Image: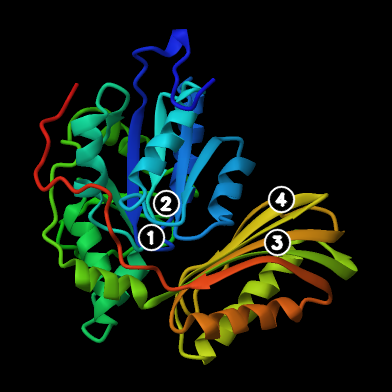
Amino acid sequence: MNHGESKPQDRGFRPTIVAIGGFLGAGKTSLIVSAARLLQGRGVKAAALLNDQGAELVDTRFVEANDIQTGQVVGGCFCCRLSDLLHAAEELRVHMPEIIFAEAVGSCTDISATVLQPLKLEHAARFRVAPYTVLVDPERAKKWMDPDMDPELAFLFYKQIEEADLVCFSKADRFTEFPSLPSGSNRFLSAHTGEGVAAWLDDVLGGRFRPGGKILEIDYERYARAEAALAWLNCRATVKLAIAASPAVVVGPLLERLEAALTEKGFIIAHLKVMDESPTGWVKASIVRNGGELSIQGNLDASPAGEHELMLNARAAGSPDDLQRAVESQLAAIPGAVRIRSMQCFSPAPPKPEKRVGYVVTDVD
């Protein structure tokens, strides 16, 4: 069957694309997993599309490990890879999901004009479009709103909020105080406990909010400078340990050492995450800021194993060369034989949207 060709039973079938944005480490992937599980309990099939500037995505493997049908768009953000997004969505459509969650790159903005409006204008016969949600990490929001914060990263943060149809604080189980945002957001979610997830789904699927109801005014030269301030690293490695250990015992110390090394070198950490898959189980661990708490999910009680497959993604403001050296140094410090199978490290290229619609397209039922 050719890509995009519909089965007889799916002619006229229109899954809803639920786009989710927010800065790196805001909890987008965790929300997708939590929401997909909730929908599954309602008898609603959901799938996910992950997006990244590079390949070898921890988030893709994490979603797949949670038994959710998954696709990915790599090598650029959704706005610059709209054709790839449509191709990947068509591939998922064959599996007949009613909902396709689409997670935008954490440094990306202008999603409404470059993705949602083109979908509504040219592809309404194949897909519905839900209101655009932007997630906000409460602690990071406080830092970004500090006048001394890096103005380029703050620019991305505020632009993401500005174009959202819904703004939601994530990680609500961990915080009791939330900063006041320009959007006046009063929605609170916790993917960990499920708090607010059902209400959010009702918001984005219930027709109460207009999908893609805002168009940004944005300086693309400044947008490019802001993204270029970040170093982006994706790698995959095979580890044969001198002494068998569980995945949690491997990734916890690895991330803590890497966070300390990058902080010492003056990097502003946006997101560090590792997926470890061994014959006895898998673990995903992440850190989303300098000095931040380690978050770990997966088979925490997995038995020790000698062989581990690691996938590591790092996003930090600083030099790509210095970031790569730091990662290579910390991988080499793992007690055993480490073979790096792939390594990408770069700063994102200037965004060049395939298509930009500068007005709000009339919604299609």
**Please, what secondary structure does the residue beneath circle 1 have?**
loop
How far separated are the C-alphas under marks 1 and 3? Answer: 22 Å
Instruction: Answer whether labels 1 and 2 touch (C-beta < 8 Å).
Output: yes
Amino acid type at image mark 2: Lys
In primary-sequence order, the first of circles 1 and 2 is: 2
- Quadrant of the snapshot with the N terminus: top right
How far separated are the C-alphas under marks 4 and 1? Answer: 26 Å
Q: Position of residue 198 (x, y in %)?
A: 37, 35
Instruction: Answer whether labels 4 and 2 touch (C-beta < 8 Å).
Output: no
In primary-sequence order, the first of circles 2 and 3 is: 2
Amino acid type at image mark 4: Asn
In the picture, the disc for residue 299 is: 4
Residue lying at the far right of the rendered structure:
243
Nearer the observer, 79 or 164: 79
In primary-sequence order, the first of circles 3 and 4 is: 4
In primary-sequence order, the first of circles 4 and 1 is: 1
Residue depicted at 25% across the width and 87% down the height: 148
| Residue identifier under label 2 | 28
How far separated are the C-alphas under marks 4 and 2? Answer: 21 Å
- Quadrant of the snapshot with the C terminus: top left
Q: Residues within 10 Å of mark 1 (few under 14, many from 20)?
A: many
Q: Position of residue 204 (x, y in %)?
A: 28, 35
Q: Is residue 197 visible?
A: no
Nearer the observer, 67 or 51: 51
In the picture, the disc for residue 106 is: 1
How far separated are the C-alphas under marks 3 and 4? Answer: 15 Å
